[in-house]
Image (cartoon, grey):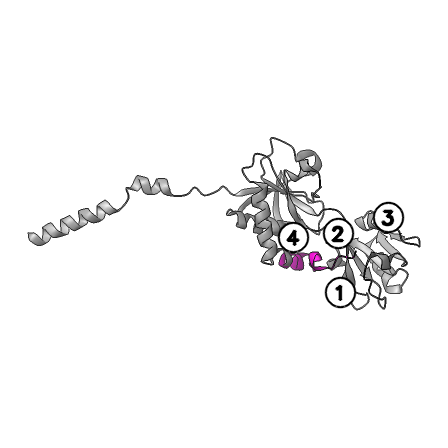
């Protein structure tokens, strides 16, 4: 009888120390909902997928993996990707259901864009690819006396305008023709978007000179954080900074772009 009384008193004491079931449930933190991320699918080198309705399935590419890595840093997975066909027109849409957009959106220096655009996650600089045997340029001034080529419609053309070369540039229709001009020495340096340069030189390094560096062009590509999404731009910036410091952005660039453009020296 004495032993049963002791066991009963001990059970009561333990039960008194444990929180009630309702309190335990109430203290559990709410899990954030999975993110909906908008993609533009305008640049196959950065993102690709199959559009079904508004949803993007089989999404893949550098920006897709950046979105997934960013979501992990924010503490929630990506639930789905949706298609954003005209980023410039739809970004301000109040009826949008996505929270973040990685759709080839260039960061601008004006205050209105800075309120909703993150720090850049990918440079929009232009890379300098040289022909074999050319003395490696140390700065932009060394390029002005060279024959420069670029692909029509690319940011390399606008970079040539700011470069002001002394001879007329050679503008061509495609990447293969650009490589041919470098291989034959018809042009000394090719200016190409830095995010494309890894794929352009891949498999052709023995026939081309080195990628000498990059020329500043634009502010970079940024994440658009939709107003009212519950996510602060400052939070996204901190997550991107961590991804940059721990090497995640560089690793993803080397995997999907064949080269990390941010690692190229900037020519001044």
Highlighted range, magenta: 251-268
Which residue is rendered at x = 89% and y = 63% of the image? 185
Q: What element carries label 2?
A: loop
Compute the Cα span from label 3 to label 4. Answer: 29 Å
Instruction: Judge depth for marks 1 and 3 and give the one in front.
Output: 3
Q: Can residue 61 be seen in this view?
A: no
Residue 95: x, y in percent? 60, 31
Instruction: Tell which circle, 4 or 2, labels the residue nearer the N-terminal end.
Output: 4
The disc at residue 62 is: 4
Q: As displayed, is residue 118 above or below residue 94? A: below
Separation of disc 1 and disc 3 at Cα?
A: 30 Å
Kind of element beneath mark 1:
loop
Classify residue 48 as left or right of residue 74. Answer: right
Labels 4, 1: front one = 4
Rendered residue at 57%/53% (across/down): 242
Which part of the image, by quadrant, shows the C terminus? bottom right
From the viewer's side, name the closer residue of 195 and 55: 195
Residue 265 included in the magenta stretch of the image? yes
* Picture quadrant where residue 90 is located: top right
- Crowding at dot 2, Cα within 10 Å, few <14 / some 14-19 / many 20+, comes out as many
* Circle nearer the N terminus (2, 3): 2
For the residues carrying marks 3 and 4, which lies nearer the camera in this image?
3
Among the 4 quarters of the image, the one containing residue 181? bottom right
Mark 4 to mark 2: distance in Å? 17 Å
Q: Quick check: 86 above or below 185?
A: above
Residue tagged 3:
161
Marks 3 and 4 close (CB-CB < 8 Å): no
Camera sees residue 12: yes
Give the residue pinned by disc 2: 125
């Amino acid at each position: 009888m004495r032993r049963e009384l002791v066991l009963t008193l001990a059970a009561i004491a333990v039960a008194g120390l444990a929180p009630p079931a309702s309190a335990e449930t109430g203290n559990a933190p709410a899990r954030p909902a999975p993110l909906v991320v908008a993609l533009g699918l305008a640049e196959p080198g950065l993102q690709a997928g199959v559009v079904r309705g508004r949803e993007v399935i089989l999404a893949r590419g550098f920006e897709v993996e950046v979105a997934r890595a960013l979501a992990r840093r924010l503490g929630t997975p990506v639930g789905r990707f949706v298609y954003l066909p005209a980023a410039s027109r739809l970004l301000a849409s109040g009826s949008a259901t996505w929270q973040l957009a990685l759709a080839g959106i260039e960061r601008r220096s004006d205050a209105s864009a800075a309120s909703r655009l993150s720090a850049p996650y990918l440079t929009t600089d232009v890379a300098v690819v040289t022909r074999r045997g050319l003395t490696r340029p140390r700065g932009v001034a060394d390029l002005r006396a060279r024959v420069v080529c670029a692909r029509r419609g690319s940011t390399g053309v606008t970079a040539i305008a700011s470069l002001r070369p002394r001879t007329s540039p050679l503008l061509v229709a495609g990447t293969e023709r650009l490589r041919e001009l470098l291989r034959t020495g018809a042009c000394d340096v090719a200016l190409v978007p830095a995010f494309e340069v890894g794929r352009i030189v891949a498999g052709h390094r023995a026939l081309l000179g080195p990628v000498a560096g990059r020329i500043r062009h634009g502010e970079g590509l940024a994440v658009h954080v939709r107003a009212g999404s519950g996510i602060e731009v400052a939070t996204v910036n901190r997550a991107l900074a961590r991804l940059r410091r721990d090497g995640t952005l560089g690793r993803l660039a080397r995997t999907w772009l064949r080269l990390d453009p941010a690692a190229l020296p900037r020519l001044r």
